[in-house]
Amino acid sequence: MSAPDAPDAPGTTDAMQSASPGAAPHSGRARARKAECAPARGGLDLAEAPVCQQHCEDADVIARVRARMAPDEDMAELAATFRLLGDRTRVRILEALAGDELCVCDLAAVVGHSQSAVSHQLRLLRAAKLVRVRRDGKNAFYSLDDDHVRHLFRQALDHVQESR
């Protein structure tokens, strides 16, 4: 299988080179890019195609998107946070804590696991700064670390529920 022909400079065509660099999305530059990426007659409709049917990188778009992306260290931490949220028990714990501060005994009863199992999950959530602990005598009370965690949980839950 041979690679499709690509222009000399990635993302440029004659029509693109003549367009102004700060052109609006619906300018001649955007139309030229759409024409460059458009399928051949009788080909798949791009709306139905899972990938580009023709290689057509736009160097300016790529540079702009890369410039606004967060540093790799932040993305690694974010990925670790989402991995933690990939466990049903931990998500149930966050759901319970989204409404109330709870001691480990009550939290274990709410999620239906032993105190030991819940305590283990809480250690992981604390290490990720998703929950915090307050000690009162011999009891430990947990709550969500801050409103960011509450919003993250609520938005993710809303996203899951909107398709129903």
Image (cartoon, rainbow, N blue to C red):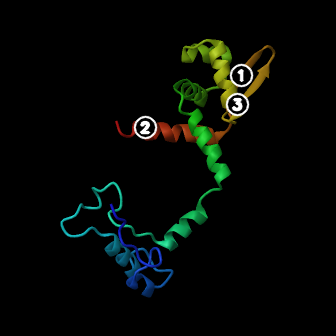
Asked whether, in this view, residue 33 is left or right of residue 153, the answer is left
Alpha-carbon distance for marks 2 and 3? 25 Å
Q: Which is more N-terminal, label 3 or label 2?
A: 3
Residue farthest to the left, as pictured: 42
In which quadrant will I find the C terminus?
Answer: top left
Question: Which of the marked residues, 1 or 2, is nearer the chain's N terminus?
Answer: 1
Residue at coordinates 30% horizontally, 56% vertically from top-left? 49
Which quadrant of the structure image shows residue 119? top right
The answer to whether mark 1 and mark 3 are in CB contact below 8 A is no
Q: Position of residue 109 (x, y in %)?
A: 58, 13
Instruction: Identify the element where label 1 is drawn.
Output: strand
Q: Sequence-wise, which precedes: disc 1 or disc 3? A: 3
Q: State the mark number for residue 141.
A: 1
Q: Is residue 48 above or below residue 34?
A: above
Please tell me how crowded label 1 is: few (under 14), some (14-19), or many (20+) other residues with Cα within 10 Å. Answer: some
Q: Extreme bottom residue here?
A: 18
Which residue corresponds to mark 2? Answer: 160
| Residue shown at 34% from the left, 70% from the top | 37
Dot 2 falls on a residue whose secondary structure is helix
User: What is the CA distance from the residue labelled 1 to the residue labelled 2?
Assistant: 29 Å
The residue under label 3 is: 126
Closer to the camera, 5 or 105? 5
Count of numbered badges drawn on the protein: 3
Residue type at mark 1? Phe
